[in-house]
Amino acid sequence: MKRLLFSTVLLLVIATFFSCSDDPKFNYDYFANPDNVARVANAFEGSYEGRTRVFVRGKNSAQIELPDSIWQTGWTNEAKSRPILRYSLGGKGRQNLTVEQFPISAIGYIVDDSALADALKKAPARNLVFNYNLFSSSNTNSEHHGVMDFDHDDVSLTLYYGGARHVVNILFNIPTSYEFDIDKGPYCLDHIQFWADELYVDGKLQQSFDLFTDEALFEVRIVSYNYSHDTVADGLQTKDDK
């Protein structure tokens, strides 16, 4: 009886082993090597310029029209609602995406608090900086299918309104990851999307922004049409190499 039971268990173990052997074999070791991270980051490094679409609405889907004067600080207005936006991607030691001279004043047009809104509309343009990390994708069975994932950017401002000085923080988020093939290239971040996520005043949540509810929304999408590669990455193909 014991021998029969042992044989039955052994057959089940063997069957389980062979049934699992057909599963995809994921290998996440490629970006565990710092040299590979540096090589791919350097391949992406460069300056970009793209046509921009801005999606903005107030709370409860209220229509908001941004004045053209917003885009005159750091952005060139190609056509109404289609400004030109410049951004850059850093390589080894500078793994970040920088959106140059973003008009923070535009956020003032979707803020509920009128005093805070007026103060934000006077805020100067500034760079948005999103740090990024590189991973191997779990969606394929190839360790050479990569993913660039971005952290949020916390923009901190000191504004004077309502008779007092306040620390205002605006969280910007890049909601999607950028996938690429390490073997094929080219290495070009030819489109990005980001939006305002939350606004804090003196450490307390003041207002949330959301694409999928009736909250206000400020979303930016850029498709690059001009790209210059800054460094040479050995063994990897960049857009300039094509």
Image (spheres, rainbow, N blue to C red):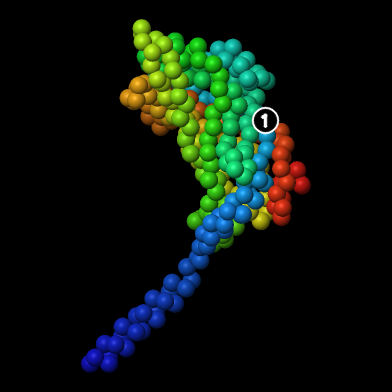
Name the side, left or right, on which 143 lies relative to 20: right
Picture coordinates of residue 217 (x, y %)?
45, 25
The amino acid type of the residue labelled 1 equals Glu
Which residue is found at the position 71% from the left and 36% from the top? 227
Let me know if residue 199 appears in the view.
yes
Q: Which residue is located at x 66 percent, y 19 percent?
A: 76
Q: Residue 80, located in which quarter of the rendered image?
A: top right
**Image point 63% across, 26% down: which residue?**
85
Q: Residues within 10 Å of mark 1 (few under 14, many from 20)?
A: some
Q: What residue is shown at x 63% (from left), y 42% (from top)? A: 91
Q: Mark 1 — residue?
A: 49
Q: Foreground: 7 or 119?
A: 119
Image height of 90 relative to 12, above or below: above
Q: Secondary structure at mark 1?
A: strand
Q: Is residue 96 above or below residue 1?
A: above
The residue at the far top in this view is 163
Quadrant of res 60: top left
Q: 228 left or right of 130?
A: right
Total numbered circles = 1
